[in-house]
Image (cartoon, helix red, strand yellow):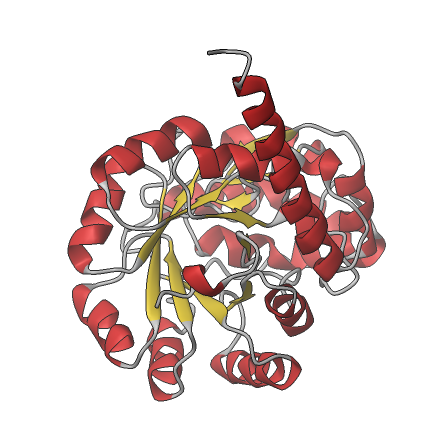
């Protein structure tokens, strides 16, 4: 029996690296009948192991862990150095030095080894597709493997690897693009229908989904569940900063940018994004390490004009509620929306 088939509500909490995802949030979503997720990206393996233990202490329901795959591509070192020179005056104004633009694999081998040694119900991947050996090893230990795709051909490739489900991420989603390359621009509904036409695996729809009618729409379009991230950013269990919560509650537009991390990601448009997006090079995690001290200073100072504030396009619909209430209220909204469609459909025949 798949994990998705055991859920009381068709709601998956998106893994939001960098602070918003917490063991408390993952456990609350799972305990409420959805599927909570831990973000393994941007933390060390010891922290991941501790977070998994905390989720298990809070709930006996299934949950997932999301891994960042290492970026296999090279970077333009000259372009990154030019970007560093561009940002240096701003960093000096904030009293910090820019970080070293080093590469790295986010300790992927160590994190994968930890998940093989102590299996969890679900492991999902972003920033490309896992190799066949990793998929097989996880599945042998009873772990479901989910792959994140942002284009139809990636779904076909994921199915060929033997994964159990595919997360279909539209361009409306907040945070980083989950596929590789990251230059796609498929909106969720067209992408979901294209993937459904070529892939028989269970699909989890992600991208700009915050309320019940949106979940109902993707279920009608072929998804088995919806993955919500921005919807949980204002929950008390989330690790979002007060500045991030306030910004999500506003009506500012969002945009895709490489300016903060070197990988395309959707966040609230602010001065930093507008001023530096055009000059930002491709290069993750190099640009992330470069800007990290500057972004940390912005968070420390509560400066929303500089901080990266990831959010999906429908962020004004997010509410300040406990995570369990988000799950149950969104699920009730799904039922109401589907009932309304059925009622209207009686007039179409």
In the image shown, does 30 or 24 lie closer to the viewer? 30
Position above or below: 245 against 8: above
The reply, left or right, for residue 130 in relation to residue 217 is left
The reply, left or right, for residue 213 in relation to residue 128 is right
Position above or below: 152 against 294: above
The reply, left or right, for residue 339 in relation to residue 171 is right
Q: Position of residue 220 (x, y in %)?
A: 45, 34
Question: Which residue appears farthest toward the top when viewing the image?
Answer: 348
Residue, x 59% and y 31% (percent of image)?
255
In the image shown, does 278 or 257 lie closer to the viewer? 257
In the image shown, does 62 or 241 lie closer to the viewer? 62
Q: How many marks?
A: 0
Position above or below: 131 against 225: below
Residue, x 66% and y 54% (percent of image)?
327
Q: Position of residue 95 (x, y in %)?
A: 77, 57
Q: Position of residue 148 (x, y in %)?
A: 37, 50
Q: Is residue 172 visible?
A: no
Residue, x 50% and y 37% (percent of image)?
280
The quarter of the rendered structure image containing the N terminus is: bottom left
Q: Quadrant of residue 272?
A: top right
In the image shown, does 275 or 218 lie closer to the viewer? 218
Q: Position of residue 167 (x, y in %)?
A: 39, 49
């Amino acid at each position: 029996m798949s994990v998705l088939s055991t859920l009381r509500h068709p709601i998956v909490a998106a893994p939001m690296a960098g602070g918003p995802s917490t063991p408390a949030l993952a456990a609350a979503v799972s305990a409420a009948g959805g599927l909570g997720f831990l973000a393994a990206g941007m933390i060390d393996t010891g922290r991941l192991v501790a977070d998994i233990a905390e989720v298990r202490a809070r709930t006996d329901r299934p949950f997932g862990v999301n891994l960042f795959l290492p970026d296999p591509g090279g970077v333009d070192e000259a372009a990154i150095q030019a970007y560093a020179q561009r940002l240096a005056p701003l960093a000096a104004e904030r009293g910090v030095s820019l970080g070293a633009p080093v590469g790295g694999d986010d300790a992927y081998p160590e994190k994968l080894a930890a998940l093989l040694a102590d299996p969890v119900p679900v492991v999902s991947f972003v920033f490309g597709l896992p190799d066949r050996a990793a998929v097989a090893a996880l599945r042998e230990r009873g772990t479901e493997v989910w792959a994140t795709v942002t284009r139809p051909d990636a779904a076909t490739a994921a199915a060929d690897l033997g994964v159990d489900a595919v997360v279909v991420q539209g361009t409306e989603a907040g945070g980083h693009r989950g596929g590789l390359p990251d230059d796609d621009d498929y909106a969720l509904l067209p992408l979901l229908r294209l993937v459904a036409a070529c892939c028989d695996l269970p699909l989890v729809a992600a991208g700009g989904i915050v309320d019940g009618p949106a979940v109902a729409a993707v279920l009608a379009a072929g998804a088995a569940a919806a993955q919500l991230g921005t919807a949980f950013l204002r929950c008390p269990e989330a690790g979002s900063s007060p500045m991030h919560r306030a910004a999500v509650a506003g009506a500012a537009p969002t945009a895709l940018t490489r300016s903060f991390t070197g990988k395309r990601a959707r966040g609230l448009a602010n001065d930093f994004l507008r001023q530096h997006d055009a000059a930002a090079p491709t290069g993750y995690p190099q640009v992330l390490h470069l800007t990290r001290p500057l972004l940390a200073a912005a968070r420390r100072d509560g400066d929303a004009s500089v901080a990266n504030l990831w959010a999906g396009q429908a962020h004004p619909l997010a509410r300040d509620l406990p995570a369990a209430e988000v799950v149950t209220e969104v699920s009730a909204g799904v039922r109401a929306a589907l009932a309304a469609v059925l009622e209207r459909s009686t007039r179409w025949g």
